[in-house]
Image (tube, rainbow, N blue to C red):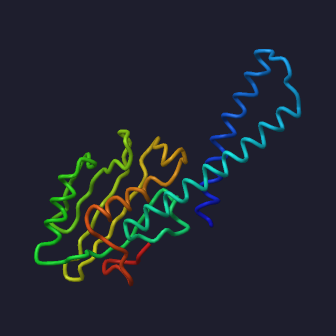
Amino acid sequence: MRVLVGCWRDAAGVFAAVLGTVEILRVALGQDGVTWSGAGEDVVLWAAASVVWAVVTSLLLRRRSRTAGVALTSTALADRQTRQLRALRPSVGWSGRMGAELKASDRVAVTAEKGREEIWFRWRPGRHGHTVWGSITFDEPSGTVLLDLREGEAYTGISGVRRGASFVALCQLAGGLGLVEAEGRWRGGDQA
């Protein structure tokens, strides 16, 4: 429910800006028939459109999280996503293969390694060139990874909602690398 409310707040802001611009243009152009009742109808239309937009966006997030095997939590629209995930098929050298897969992806812009256990990167969750910053830390003995993703500057988010890009990137990475939600705690510290 919190995800839906967060989506609605962002959608309402976008639709309010559009509604305000339309009303100002109507008055500035001196259109005949500009009345309070007409403005009231526009407000009702704005409210209905923003609710529909929010419902569709939250359903898309829910679908994406189910497909990726990642829980949709109340913090899905936060700027930062930190999750502990486990490899579906850990075998000898799984972290090296996963790192090579990550670097070979067409969504990765920059990668840097800190030893064999951590990779820093920029991930492009959408069609545009905007990216989120991320790191993946491998814990080979337990078969888990820690994904830490942060939204970059001036990112417009998903489906017209201004937030949620780091959650979309989390789902894309989990699905693409064969990771699922892990129970318990990360060995190197607390799970966010």
Residue 88 point in image, percent of width and height: 25, 75
182 over 124 or under it: above or below? below
Q: How many marks?
A: 0
Residue 147 point in image, percent of width and height: 33, 66
Residue 111 point in image, percent of width and height: 22, 52
- Left or right, 119 with reference to 61: left
Task: Identify the image quadrant of the C terminus.
Answer: bottom left
Task: Identify the image quadrant of the N terminus.
Answer: bottom right
Residue placed at 11% from the left, 73% from the top?
93
Identify which residue, 76 or 117, lies in the foreground: 76
User: Seen from this angle, which residue lies furthest top?
Assistant: 29
92 over 126 or under it: above or below? below
111 over 117 or under it: above or below? above
Identify which residue, 128 or 80, lies in the foreground: 128
Residue placed at 49% from the left, 43% from the top?
156
- Left or right, 163 with reference to 147: right
Q: Which of the 4 image quadrants contains residue 170?
A: bottom left
Residue placed at 62% from the left, 47% from the top?
11
Identify which residue, 76 or 58, lies in the foreground: 58
User: Seen from this angle, which residue lies furthest right?
Assistant: 36
Q: Which of the 4 image quadrants contains residue 187?
A: bottom left
